[in-house]
Every structure is written in C-alpha cells, then in structure tokens.
Image (cartoon, coloured by chain):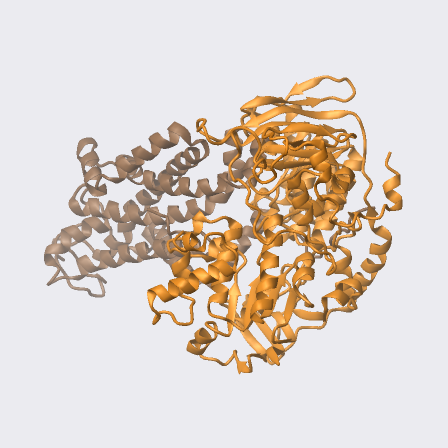
Amino acid sequence: MTQIDIDGLTVTYASAQGDIPVLSQVSVSIGAGESVAIIGESGSGKSTLAAAIMGFLRTGSSVRAGELRLDGEDVLSASNRRLREMRRGVVSLVPQNAGHALTPSMTIGRQIAEALPGFPGQGAAEMRAEVVRLLGEVKLPTPEAIFDRYPHQLSGGQQQRAAIAMGLASRPKILVLDEPTTGLDVVTQASILKLIGSLRAAHNMSIVLVSHDLGVVAHLCERAVVLYAGQVVEDADTRTLLAAPSHLYSQALISAIPSTGRPGLPLGLPGTPPHPRPLLAGETAADPISESELQGWRQHAAAAKKEFRPYRPVATNAPVLRVKELSVDYRRKPDGVSGPTVAGVSFEIQKGEILALIGESGSGKSTIASAIAGLRPLAAGSIELIDPESGSTVDLSRPVKRRSRRTLSSVQLVFQNADTSLNPRRSIQDSIERPLRLFLRIAGTKLHEKRDAIMRDVGLNREFAHRLPSQLSGGQRQRVGIARSIATSPKVILADEVVSALDVSVQASVLRLIDDVRREHELSVLFVAHDLAVVRGLADRLIVLHLGRIVEQGTVEDIFAGPNHPYTRTLIDSILDPDPDAVSPVDEVEIAMPTQPPLLGTAFADRYPSASGNRHPSTVDFGNGHLINTHLTRAELLALPHNNRANPAPSDSAKDVQ
Amino acid sequence: MNPPVAQSTEQASPAWVMELRRTMVGIGKSPSTMFGLGLIAMHVIIALTVALWAPYSPIATNPAAILKSPSVQHWLGTDSLGRDIFSRVVYGGQFSLGLSIMAAVFCVVIGGTLGMLAAFYRGWFDEALMRLVDAVLSVPTILALLLVVSLMGNGPVVIAVAATVVYAPAVARVARAATLQVVELDYVTAAKGRGESGAAIILREILPNVLDVLLVELAMKASWILLLVSSLSFLGFGANPPTPDWGLMVSENRTLLSVRPWGTVAPIIALGTLIIGFNLAADGLAKIRGVDRAGAV
C-alpha cells in the first residue's frame, strides 16, 4: 500500500526575479515500511521535498502544481488544524541538528511527552512511563535519569537519540529524517544509523531519509531518489544505483565519491549550483536539464574513469616541522581530575608529505594546528621549523606577534569553513593579494601577475577576481582559501577540516587540488580531519588522536592493515562506504568513552583491560614508523580483532611508492 | 591536470560598487525608506537654501503685524513680536539640524572606535570602558546636558560635545556587540595568523563588516540628538533668542496654543517630519543591510 504519494509536485520560491522553481514535477511514491533516501547536492531541493512531506513550506514558497498524499490524504489542501493532527500520528520529523531542535529550557522528558498521542489528557505517571520506555527504545543509558535532564546535559549523539524518541512518540507511519547524522562524529553516526535501522524494522514505518552522504544511504535505505535542480533524475533501488547508475548525473555523482575499497582521489564535480529561470504564469515545470549539462556529465563520466588518481604516497626523509612533547592547557588551574587538553604530542612532518591528524570533536586536533600557527600559547614542549637544505631551525613556540615575516609566510592556515574565513566585504583579489603585499612587498603589475598565476594554479577563472565571496560556490571559496595560503610559497600548510563543510561531490576536487599543490610546490601539509575515509586516498601518514593524546601513528597503509589501537579500530570500523554489502561492525550502544583527558594513565584501561594489569600507556613499535601508544602488550594488540574491513586489493599504483 | 575552471559570463565590478547597487535597489523597493530619506533630503535642502524660501527675515520684528492669523502676506501668521512664522520655520532647522548631524558624526566616530577597540582587545580595557559606559548610561540624559550647558554655556560646540559624551557610550556598546561577532570569525583569525597589526585588522577586516551597524546608528543618533537639542532650546538652554529654532519657537508660542495654534504646531510638524525621516531611514537601512537592531540600546 502506498504511504506517500507525490505526483507532479512543483514548488516555487518567490525572489526578486520571479518565482524560481525549487522542485519541478517531482513524482515519488513510497510504500508502507519502505525506506527511501532523497539524495542531492546542496541546493538540489531535497530539504524542501522533506519539508513538503511534513506539510511545511518555507515563507515565500508556494505550490505551483501537483499533489501530495500521505496515507491517502491530501496534504496540500489540508487545514492547519488537520496538518497538526497529521504530524501527531501520521508523519514525524527528526531534524538535522538535535542540539538546536530541542528546547533548552525544558527537560527531555517533558518535551517528548508533548508529542505523545495522549497529551495533554493523559495521567502524569502514565506519560512518564511511556516516555521512559521510548528513551530506552532509542538505547539511551539510564532512561529514568535522562527524563529529567536538560538538552545541554546530553552529548550530541544522545541529543539525536532523544530527537528520534520524540519522532517516535506519536507512533507515526512515516518518519522523515533530515540529515540525521551530519553533525555527529563518525562513531556516533554509525551507531545512530544502526538504531534507526532496527527501529524501522520494529515499527514497520516508512522512512524518508534526506542525505548527501551515499555511505549513510547505502546502510539504511533500499531505494534512492536522486534530485538535481529540483528534478528527479533517477529513482532506483540503492544497489542498482550504486553499482550501475543509469542517469548521467548519478553516474558523475557516484564516481566523485571516494571509497576505502578503492583508495585514491576521484574526479570531483564542478559543484556550481544550477540557476533555474523563473517560471512564467501558468507554467508548472522548470526547463528540462539542458543538453550542455548532460554533455558535461557525459564528459565527466568518461574522464572520471581515466582521471581517477590512485593512492600514491610520497615518502621523503627531510623533516620541515618538528613538534616535541607539545602540551596545550585550557584549564585555568590544575583540578586534580583531568589532565591538559593536549599532552605529550610529538611528531615530524617531512617535506612534501601530507600528514593527517585524525580525531573526533574535542580530540585537540585543531588546537594543535593553531598552536603551530602561533595562535595558542604552549603549556610545554617545542615546535621547530626546519630548513631541509641548511638544517637550520626556527623556533615556532613563540606566538604570532613575535615571529619574523619570513617565518609567518612559511606557515599558512586553511580553514574549515570558507564562508567565514573570507572577509565578506573584500573581493577575492583583495583576499589573495593581501599576503603577497604583506610578505613579498610587491605591488603593481608584478602583484597582479602573481595573483593571476595563483588563481590559475587553484583553478579559479580570472573573472572571479572582482567578486565577493558570497558570489562563489562553497568549493570555489575553498579554492580561494587555498590560493591565499599558497600565495607566499609557504613550507607548511595547516589545513583544518578543509573539506568537511563541502558536498561530497565537491570534496574530491578540493582534495585533488591539495594533492596537486603539494606535489607541485613540495609543500608539507598537516591535514586535520575527523573522517578517515577522506584521508584514505590522500594522506601519506596518519596520527590518531584521542582526548589530546596520540594513540597511534604510522603510514596510512600500515594503519588500515592493522594491528591497531582499539580506538583506531573503532574509527576504521565506523567508516561508511557507499556499498550496501559492507557491514559496519560498530556496537549499537555508543562506545562509553571518557570525555575528559585523564590526569594519569590512559582512558582505555577500563574498557580494554590488559592482562598485565598495566594502566599506563607505552609505545609499541610495529616498524616503519607505525607506533601505538597503549597500555596493552604487543601480543594483546595482535590478538585484538582487526581487518574487519576487507583490505583493498593492492592496485598497480600502490607499488610505485618512491 | 588542471582542476576544472568554473566559467563566468557577467562583467565584474568592484566590490563597493556592487554593495552600493544592492543598497540602492533595496531602497528603491522599500517605500518607507525612500520616504524617510526624502524627508531628510527635503529638510537638508531647505536648511541649505533658506533664502530661496523665506519671504521675510526670520528675526525682523514688525509692531504693525502682531499675532496675525495666516493670510496671503503671512502664510502661517505672525508671532507676538510680529515675526513671520513661516520664515522662522524655514530657518528653524539650520541650528538644530546642523548641530545634531555634527554631534551624531562625533558620536559614531568616537563610540564606534572605542567599541571596536574594546571588543578586539578585550581584557582590562574592555572591562574599564564598559563600566564607564554603564555609569554614563545610568545618568538621565537631559539632566546631564543641562548641567554641562549651565556650567559651560550653550555654544554649539559645547552642546555637540556634551551630546557626544552622553550618546557615544550607547554607540560604543552597539559597536562592541557587532565587533564581538566578527572577531570570532576565521578571517580575523587568518589576519592574526598573518601577523597583521591590531590597527590593520580593525580597519581592514572589522570596520567594513560593522560599517552597516554604524551607519544605522548614525541615523538613529541624529534623530535622538535632534530631539535633545530641541528640548534644550525649549527649556531655554539651547538656541538663544532671537535665533529661529523649532524648540525655541514652541516654547515662545506655547502660551497661545489655544488661540493662535499655528505658531506652535508649525515648528512641531517641521521637527516631527525630520525625526520621522531619520527613524524611517534608520529602520529601512537596517533592514536592507541586514543589521540586527534587537541589541541596540
């Protein structure tokens, strides 16, 4: 039986130019108990479609044509009162950011109780029992206690679980999930997805999942609808879509996504959002996708096969940056319970190497980057910049204010969010020219030539020079950020989560750009990331951080092959490849990890006790620079399950390691 | 291999031209903003070209035409000294309008600078400045001004400086709040990472992004100061007789309000339209430029 029936839905958004189509002639039907993903890049209209299913239209939007029926009932003509009733029993929404969606001044239990079908007539004790049952169902520990907590007292993953419990409270037939795991750490993401999968089976709900992440889709949905510019370009079961997409756009999109099974850098999509023309009065559909766009994807699909850049690590032995026993402390004074935020971190970056610093939020990875940039005072330890030719060193322990101009130009930052790292009131050329003026002291024609050369290097058309950041797409803005950082020929680039705010399809092209510039200019890159899948095809070496301590380091190949620290293993197991057959071995319950850096010993001693009774970590060396800092013995590490994920077949290129 | 180069077809113009164009388009679409700016423009033009409009001298007394009702000779009648009320209303904007715009500029320049410095450097400077701001804001404005004027005289410079002292703290607080949001952003961190000086960061990175807030404050404060200066004149501490000034005219003619209302109502309408103009312009600009006025004092 059809649970959701959308037929020829066209939604427009009123702008100064006219009514711009956001959705055009969208027809989808979803059966009871079916789980369907809506996939698309940002701006494809996927969130508008999800909102329309809930009976919401953003202010300024209106329905031009089409029908939308939930459970046989027309949503578009329903009264507000009827819509409210439907949202309490037919359809529920789990929002993207549970931290913002929960009311901060109400306890979790009271908020969820308001969504119960019996509210407000039901007895208090009865409602409490029901809510506690729901909290238990979403696998929150100690549901009784969580009932009386406020949202800020829960972690991000727990908040998302509470939001899911709220979605379930009205016993809906349809659950709409809008990017339910996008803001979460990888380990949490994997466990939330498992939870959603099991709830769906238990309640026989229809699930509509809005996502840009094909890994998430592959794990949760059996069918996927691909949107481009508000139009459905493909509607197929997930397996077929991922293995043999039929539409040119789907082919281009899927080929742009990296996979740990095939390490390397795929060819990214250009990522320029389409600009549909406004609809005239009486028109009910946007123009079909133009032949030139189709041609672009056709070329892309052809190029993607040839241009896939297999993983090719760079191995050199000329350190340019040495961090020794680095410690950064955010605490006002030692409190006797926890240790410093970052402690005992030592590593070297070689010339031309990409070193990835991996960890979840709060692991201190960005703190380390800003300490190297001189924006955070060190509590202990030293940072040195080394000239590989002469061997002379520069002390980077001192803050920015006390560094020479040459030193400043040698270490450059690239930020996570290109929206906020570029001054919205300064043109692109201004942003790129500033470091050139400041460090190279050039002006006039020379400055313009240099700026044009750099823009060409990062693949930005010269016409962009006069534009403001708001007139560029996310990927283009990140290119400007990279252009600015390489402008003064630095030695080290500190790249802080540079692709995590971008669409997956655009990520690939930015990663390729980073790979290009480091090979071309023999740059060393400290690549801060939380996602192992992103660095799998790019980085040469990895450092895994947990609560500001290094737990493991080594080459990417060695770390993916194991043996590993149990924490690294969890991270690797949490990677979601876009492959419906890949099984994620992560436990359902969030891994109970300490959230404060320990004063002494290691955070893992309780969860993975060592037979030796040891609680203090020491370094176990597996050769080739693969070091694990753990309280476990070598034999215990080897005995831990590893290689859960099939090891990628060695490609031809993996051999040509220099 | 070169990454794909994105194409662009439109001809680009400098950033500030585009911003100006965006603002002009916004004003064009907002009738209330146009109306407000129009009122201000009208008053400014009249104040600059008084001789073209006024049929009589605003200070010439005429014992033969005392307290005349509106007529062809005297459009708004005459006051108790036989002065033409229409001419006095035309001239009446010069003193208070010039003074309030000058004082508002002082306020925004000084308050804005202090606010940006406080938010950028934080620490003891911020703490000390904000406590000072709290102290000044707790003193009733009109009383403080009366005190200054009675101690130091009522010259235009004294009034402008006094109004600045009274209102600059409020501007400083707004500028500080706006700057606090900006200093958190990565482009400021990037500038610090380049080792730029504090002055360069404030002028290059912060000022362009709080300029909208400051412009809206300028319009708001101009209207407040106009009201304040008129109040002073009304109380006899502002413009000196026989200077034609709206506040002073209201005071001079108020006893005759019930029998000869035009002498009081005409300057009130003149003053009211100008203040409405400032307020509409401030609100409209805030909306067009996306300035959040919720936090304004």
| Residue beneath the point at 64% across and 41% down | A567
Palette colour of chain B: brown
Please give left or right for residue A215 compared with residue B237 in the image.
Answer: right
Palette colour of chain A: orange
Q: Quadrant of residue A493?
A: top right
- Residue A31, how many percent across, how many down? 63, 76
**Along the line of sight, the residue nearer the viewer: A658 or B96:** A658
* Whether residue A126 is situated above or below residue A362 in the rendered picture: below
**Along the line of sight, the residue nearer the viewer: A349 or A502:** A349
Residue A237 in sight from this viewpoint: yes
**Along the line of sight, the residue nearer the viewer: B144 or A155:** A155
- Residue B100, how many percent across, how many down? 31, 44
Which residue of the protein is positioned furthest toward the front in this rendering? Answer: A611
- Residue A532, how many percent across, how many down? 69, 45
- Residue A325, how many percent across, how many down? 62, 24
Residue A461 in sight from this viewpoint: no
Q: Quadrant of residue B269?
A: bottom left
* Whether residue B170 is situated above or below residue A131 in the rendered picture: above
| Residue beneath the point at 85% across and 59% down | A302
User: How many numbered markers are drawn?
Assistant: 0
Please give left or right for residue B51 compared with residue A273 in the image.
Answer: left
**Along the line of sight, the residue nearer the viewer: B193 or B207:** B193
